[in-house]
Amino acid sequence: MIVRRAEAGEGQLMHELPAATFGLACPPGTTGFEIANHVAMHLSAEIFEGYLSDPDREILVALSATGFVGYTMLVFGDPEDADVAAIVTARPTAELSKCYVLADEHGGGVASELMMATIAVARLRGPATIWLGVNDKNDRANRFYGKHGFEHVGFKRFALGDRFEDDFVRELTL
């Protein structure tokens, strides 16, 4: 497996990963329609192409012999969410906006290798911290982030369909 920066023109491949993984991060009771709608509205190939050309974003992909198996996306800059801005006070900071690995790869070290590479890339850009939001009911992800040094520092809300979910805000000091 290799981890590398995503490249312009890979938006469609990037879109296929969240289509297969976003539901893994959703709380129980989230419908297939809500998942598909969120992916279509926020994680389309066109949106990813925009992300790939944004100098304030870094997207890393994990590739195996079979293709893309995971990705992360860092967003550098002040948090736009008012709740997060009040909780995460260190500046500069970066958001770990996306961190997904195909279910078949869970437990095999892909996510840890991808996370270590993502933290290394973040350090090169100089933020004091990396923060993320993760659903409060996603025990697997919360254990993973805790293992990698992200501490629970507060809460924020995440819009999913026509409702809001509660997310833990976690932060890693670099």
Image: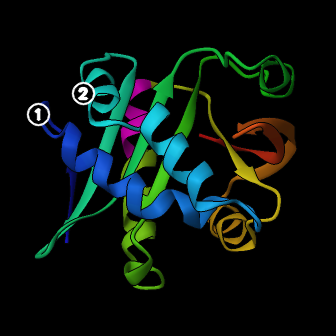
Looking at the rendered structure, the number of numbered marks drawn on it comes to 2
Relative to 152, residue 158 above or below: above
Element at label 2:
helix
* Label 1 Cα crowd, 10 Å radius (few <14 / some 14-19 / many 20+): some
Q: Is residue 155 in the magenta section?
A: no
Instruction: Give the distance between the C-alpha atoms of the residues marked 2 and 1, in whole angstroms.
Output: 7 Å
What residue lies at 35% left-to-right and 32% top-to-bottom? 58
Dominant secondary structure of the magenta stretch? Answer: helix
Colouring used for the render: rainbow
Q: Amino acid at mark 1?
A: Gly
Residue 18 % position (x, y): 41, 53
Q: Amino acid at mark 2?
A: Glu
Which mark is drawn over residue 9? 1
Residue 131 % position (x, y): 66, 38
Image quarter hosting the N terminus: bottom left
What residue lies at 20% left-to-right and 43% top-to-bottom? 12
* Label 2 Cα crowd, 10 Å radius (few <14 / some 14-19 / many 20+): some
What residue lies at 81% left-to-right and 40% top-to-bottom? 163
Q: Are discs 2 and 1 less than 8 Å apart at CB?
A: yes
Q: Is residue 121 in the magenta section?
A: yes
Which mark is drawn over residue 49? 2
Q: Which sits in the foreground, 19 or 80?
A: 19
Q: Which residues are magenta?
A: 120-125
What residue lies at 74% left-to-right and 62% top-to-bottom? 27
Image quarter hosting the C terminus: top right
Which mark is drawn over residue 132? none
Q: Which sits in the foreground, 126 or 33?
A: 33
Left or right of 72 in this view: 158: right
Residue 51 % position (x, y): 33, 25
